[in-house]
Image (cartoon, rainbow, N blue to C red):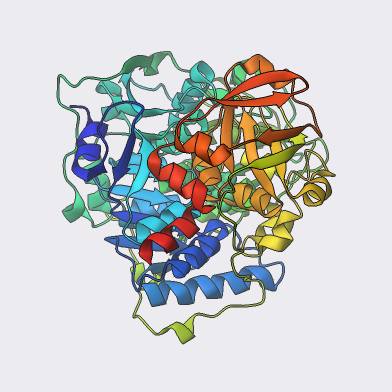
Amino acid sequence: MNLSKKIIKQHLVSGKMETGGEIGLKIDQTLTQDATGTMAYLQFEAMGVPKVKTELSVSYVDHNTLQSGFENADDHKFLQTIANKYGIIFSPAGSGICHQVHLERFGIPGKTLIGSDSHTPTGGGIGMLSFGAGGLDVACAMAGQPFYITMPKIVKVKLTGKLRPWVSAKDIILELLRVLSVKGGRGKIFEFSGEGVKTLSVPERATITNMGTELGATTTIFPSDEITKDFLKRQNRENVWSEMTADDNAEYDEEMTIDLNALEPLIAMPHSPDNVKKVKELKGIKVDQVCIGSCTNSSLADMILCSKVLKDKKISRNTSLTLSPGSRQVMSMLANSGDLFNIINAGARILECACGPCIGMGQAPKTKAVSLRTFNRNFEGRSGTKDAQVYLCSPEVALAAALSGEITDPMLYFGTKPEIQLPEKFYINDDHFQKPFGNNSSDVVRGPNIKSLPEFEPMPENMSAEVVLKVGDNISTDHILPAGAKILPLRSNLPAISEFTFGAVDKDFVSRAKKVMNGIIIGAENYGQGSSREHAALAPRYLGIKFVITKSFARIHLANLINFGIIPLTFNDSADYEIVKLADKIEFADIRNVIKNNKDLFIKVNDKNIKLNYTFTDRQKEILFAGGLLNWIKESMK
Ligand code: MIC
Ligand code: SF4
């Protein structure tokens, strides 16, 4: 058996391990971050469960740390107090980025983890089976409910050889993105194996599993081996280690091989993580900004590399360089070892241990700037500057650009690569994580930015709706509901945040949707890729969207639509996408009965009969009929 199936088997509570069918998994651990967490905990609260039922749940504050108004601070206080009430560990702002901290201090090989953040698969770096999910799914897992997914195909990614100096783990995942594209991983778990695995440290593995999300993969996982044990030992957590590997003759649905010797530094060009080129092909492009950090590349090893490379050097006068260490542990160790000195002295700006520029919280580049980032997403406008040209690359490539002021291949620019020696024992101070001591409900503090959840109607027998938006391929949740310093603070205030829905795509969308209050969105391929933010389903539902009809969906967003009672449908013939136009009115006669009995679904648009497809499990049908998962849970708990 392969490793993924071993862990699935141990956690299977419903369904069969047959590709394409729905399976329910017992979830051992959950994590939330502040931008999705407030909503997740409001939903958990509405379920009326007295304490979380997981082995461990952690609530991180890492996204909204700018506190440009009272809103973020309100949310943080709410999160702190509600964590205490329900038995959740609270990691306050400044402690680090959820995925980095979870890997360091909480993750356990062989366990299951879901998080209300799409990069939760980072945990695959230590052999955890970890998934990104909507906040409501995480709330359900905290209430002891299984997590449901479609049983994915398991793909073996065999790594052979060894990376050459100045080529890094980031180049491995960029290579996968180049070959497979942002849609290529859908419905699949990527499981790494082969001799090359032994050459990669846990932080390097985590860079890969983190960004497996950009493939659209269900998740990504490495075995837990001696290298994992060594990592956990340095974290003084050797006791949670166990060996987790695939059997020698394990079977897989698909296989692919990457020869690490043959890789060279790669870079993803604007505005998609799969727009990958060789760095040397772009040599000479002037660079205005370099940002090193994010949950993809902010480990101690990444930061020590920065220190060694920047020592006694000056960054280019035309380039600004920021560094965001991934956790307080990383920052403390850099301060203690003196590495911070080398970094600061070279002209870098040190930011908080948080998501920061990755989610548009500060460091928006100048007009038309070229910005090189070690992050995982470069969707248009995500940096906060619509016409900025954001490239994704490794710290090695980022450093070469910061020093030279242009895109340049680090293999040619630098000489011998410095040795990175990590300390035998990492500095551990868990006092920053607030353990719950369990107070009563009056202790949950709700500032005026925390608005209660709206009620949604059950699905009627017959529906008719109007097309209020038509968009193209690869629409990301950043398009649907952007983040950034202005909008992110409103994540716990649905009426306010809804006003920004599709803002950058079509500024009239909100008024049109509100006028109709019975809307349809037409999308093309891979609709809803990117972030797990359920607000990208919740806000449209709040604005009266009842259907989203596309050529195909991204996994987490599809689940979020169902969770909020929006009916996701796909064109049987993708050519029919061309027929449907803005303002078309469409009848869905007897829709409840049609879905209930799996009947063929036809709509009539502009005199043509169009067939639409859907595959809902009985559970998903009930959720849609109830008007969303929260209604369904409340009903089933009565
Ligand atoms: C992101 O990278 O887009 C985020 C912000 O971390 C999101 C979560 C969110 O929108 O709050 C994610 O990846 O799920
Ligand atoms: Fe934070 Fe960026 Fe990672 Fe999302 S991708 S969790 S915003 S660092």
**On screen, residue 136 above or below 473:** below
Q: Is residue 353 visible?
A: no
Please report the residue visible at 38 percent of the width from the left and 39 percent of the height from the top.
Answer: 149
Q: In this view, does 563 lie to the left or right of 473?
A: left
> How many numbered discs, if any?
0
Which quadrant does the C terminus fall into?
A: bottom left
**On screen, residue 48 above or below 611:** below
Measuring from the top left, give residue 172's x and y in whole percent: 44, 25
Measuring from the top left, give residue 278's x and y in whole percent: 58, 17
Q: In this view, does 557 lie to the left or right of 364?
A: left
Please report the residue visible at 45 percent of the width from the left and 56 percent of the height from the top.
Answer: 632
Q: Is residue 265 visible?
A: yes
Please report the residue visible at 74 percent of the width from the left and 43 percent of the height from the top.
Answer: 502
Out of 339 and 177, give the one closest to the viewer.
177
Out of 586 and 630, give the one closest to the viewer.
586
Measuring from the top left, give residue 564's x and y in whole percent: 55, 50
Measuring from the top left, give residue 171's x and y in whole percent: 48, 26
Out of 571 and 148, give the one closest to the viewer.
571
Which quadrant does the N terminus fall into?
A: top left
Q: In this view, does 162 lie to the left or right of 497?
A: left
**On screen, residue 255 above or below 208:** above
Out of 260 and 332, give the one closest to the viewer.
260
